[in-house]
Amino acid sequence: MARRGRGRDISGVVIVDKPQGISSNDAVQRANRLFGARKVGHTGALDPLATGVLPLCFGEATKFSQYLLSSDKKYWTRLQLGVATDSGDSDGQVLSTRPVEGVDEARIEDALRFFRGEIDQVPSMFSAIKHQGQPLYKLARQGISVEREARRVNIFSNELVALNGDQLELEIHCSKGTYVRTIAEELGELLGCGAHVIALRRRAAGPYDESDLVTFEELEAAREKGSLDSFLQPVSSTVRGWPEVMLTDNTAYYLKQGQPVIVPQAPTSGWVRLAEILDDESSRFIGVGEILDDGRVAPRRLVS
């Protein structure tokens, strides 16, 4: 979600360590009170309960936020066994309590097998998915429940890292659109006791991880020192890790006109980041492209 307004014409990405208790939109507004940018948006909401990696895109970087939205995510979570809530997390109302009996590491490991690989997952009624223009969580708060279609997601890994009494901790690497709270609810039912999320931290989103994080306190201190913009990562970081295609100025000219171009030694398929070779032999990121069936590189999203 991007917001436009009057302000500074800056571009880049700031990887905020979202604190618990605020929404992702609250985080966007808090950050932009510091940066005062014309255009800013986040790249995938975190629930108020959740903390961790929240990339905020400014200016030209908002053009590439879709690639972060569709990227893989990594989470750490702590579940409370024996208690089920309507939202699947500790912000919800308790629906039931059951004894936690015979739940050991072996039984949990056996149950986790059902939450690995490609699975169909029904989104929570407390998710931000919209139904007829209304976010589901707003309907849920009105006591309204609607039918939701299952979505195919991919759980690349789902590992038990700790079991302490009636609480367990998981580390999850998953595709976009995966709901950790739904995993918690369904795992709790498999274990016969119910469960809900009591802590959730996003540890990675696409190319960004916890090593990229900056807190709001650090941003506020940097603003006082006049060094706030030093926390802006380049627009190109949104596709960090993609294969790079280097373009001569002549080839770049035609590509900027929207024309597919032939680039020697380019990859034979997939998406690529595009860089123009400058006169001093350095390079400049100009956007992303896709390799066509005939081997040409087609522009898909370019910086202004």
Image (spheres, helix red, strand yellow):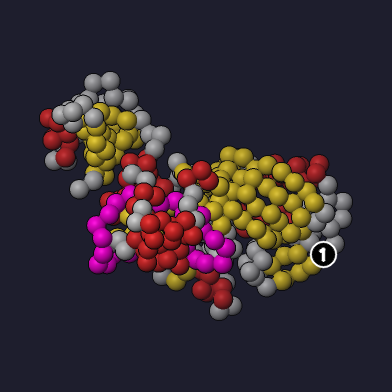
On screen, residue 15 versus residue 145, left or right, reads left
Of all residues shown, which one is farthest toward the bottom?
A: 142
Q: Quadrant of residue 194?
A: bottom right
The question of residue 23 being in magenta is answered with yes
* In the rendered image, the vertical position of residue 272 relative to residue 16, given as above or below: above
Q: Residue at x 85, y 62 (%)?
A: 99
Closer-to-camera residue (246/180):
246
Of all residues shown, which one is farthest toward the top?
A: 265
Can residue 286 be seen here? The reply is yes
In the rendered image, the quadrant that contains the N terminus is: bottom left
- Residue 109: where, in percent of width, then height? 75, 42
- Callout 1 environment at 10 Å: few (<14), some (14 to 19), or many (20+)? few
- Residue 64: where, in percent of width, then height? 33, 48
On screen, residue 248 versus residue 56, left or right, reads left
Closer-to-camera residue (65/87):
65
Tell me the magenta residue range: 1-25
Of all residues shown, which one is farthest toward the front?
A: 225
Give the residue at mark 1. Answer: 98
* In the rendered image, the vertical position of residue 145 relative to residue 283, given as above or below: below
On screen, residue 256 versus residue 102, left or right, reads left
Q: Residue at x 45, y 63 (%)?
A: 27
Q: Secondary structure at mark 1?
A: loop
On screen, residue 213 versus residue 237, left or right, reads right
Closer-to-camera residue (32/139):
32
Q: Quadrant of residue 262?
A: top left
Can residue 2 be seen here? The reply is no
Looking at the picture, which amino acid does disc 1 mark?
Arg
Q: Residue at x 18, y 31 (%)?
A: 278
- Residue 30: where, in percent of width, then height? 42, 66
The question of residue 179 being in magenta is answered with no
Q: Residue at x 29, y 31 (%)?
A: 291
- Residue 264: where, in percent of width, then height? 23, 21
